[in-house]
Image (spheres, helix red, strand yellow):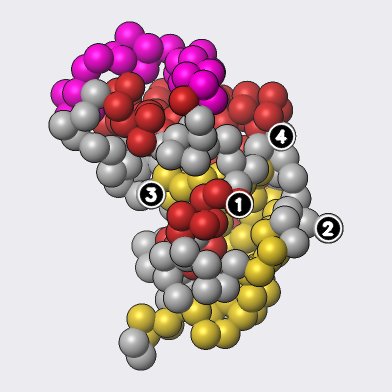
Amino acid sequence: MPLISIDRLEVRYGRIRGTQNVSFSVEEGEIVALVGSNGAGKSSTLKAILGMAGYEEGAIRFAGADLKGKKPSEIVRLGIGYSPEGRRVFPQLTVTENLRMGAFTRSARECAEREEQMFGYFPRLRERASQRASSMSGGEQQMLAIARALMSRPKLFLLDEPSLGLAPIIVERIGDILQEIRVKEGLAVILAEQNANWAMSLAARAVILDLGKVTLTGPSSELLKDERVRSAYLGA
């Protein structure tokens, strides 16, 4: 049984459809890339999973539980973490304070243990522990946003456009850390990205979205060779 399954999901914003009939699944410990241009439905899909976007049609099941109608706080407690597009760290809080905001489902002891693990994955954050988030670089803020979302020890991590506005060397480092955490913790990831080449280099499988619909899906290694994908997203 998949860790999460999305079946015929349709998200609406008034008369506008954010997604149309979107279906895919993710196994435990698997990275799946959601690839598409701006407005393709990637963020709408992630927000529906987390309970931040309502949907009348379709179903989402996580670890056997139906997520429809659940509040985001309930969904986080079930084991889903989320790092939004644009990072959205708390600018006036320190790195440590930001991290602890992500551990509201955990005890003080668990929070301290997890904080130390995050500093192990992201050594730069340890160096900046007492620094305000607003004074950090974009790459450091992205690492902080990811670490904050992982403080709750999720089984599934929703990651929205992490490469946006970052230097390639920082993007590659983030990818390395994601793979390290996936291997060590069995973390599953849904990676929503416009940077198709990078996302599919990390992911075992990819789902290509266009105008809210799934146009292609399959192993990333095969889709990277597909002329339609190469033409539309890889500049080939």
Query: How far apart in space, not on screen, are marks 4 and 2 (Cα)?
Result: 16 Å
In the visual, does 109 lie left or right of 221? left
* Res 1 label: 2
User: Which residue is found at the position 35% from the left and 49% from the top?
Assistant: 85
- Work out whether residue 158 or residue 230 is closer to the camera in this orientation and state it: 158
- Give the residue number, with chain letter if any, for mark 4: 186
- Give the residue number, with chain letter if any, for mark 3: 84
| Residue 198 lies in the magenta-colored region | no
- Give the residue number, with chain letter if any, for mark 1: 78
The quarter holding residue 24 reads bottom right
Q: Earlier in the sequence, mark 1 or mark 2?
A: 2
Q: Does the CB distance between marks 3 and 1 fall below 8 Å?
A: no
Q: Which amino acid, mark 1?
A: Leu
Q: Does the image show residue 189?
A: no
- Work out whether residue 148 or residue 190 is closer to the camera in this orientation and state it: 148
* Rendering coords of residue 66 (x, y %): 66, 69
Q: Residue 214, relative to residue 148: is it above or below?
A: below
Q: Residue 158, relative to residue 232: is it above or below?
A: above
* Crowding at mark 2 (Cα within 10 Å: few <14, some 14-19, many 20+): few
Query: How far apart in space, not on screen, are marks 1 and 2 (Cα)?
Result: 17 Å
Query: How far apart in space, not on screen, are marks 3 and 1 (Cα)?
Result: 18 Å
* Rendering coords of residue 163 (x, y %): 40, 39
Q: How many tags in the picture?
A: 4
Q: Earlier in the sequence, mark 3 or mark 1?
A: 1
* Crowding at mark 1 (Cα within 10 Å: few <14, some 14-19, many 20+): some
Q: Does the CB distance between marks 4 and 3 fall below 8 Å?
A: no
Query: How far apart in space, not on screen, are marks 2 and 3 (Cα)?
Result: 27 Å
Q: Does the CB distance between marks 4 and 1 fall below 8 Å?
A: no
Q: Which amino acid, mark 4?
A: Gly
Which residues fall within the magenta stretch? 109-136
In the visual, does 61 lie left or right of 92? right
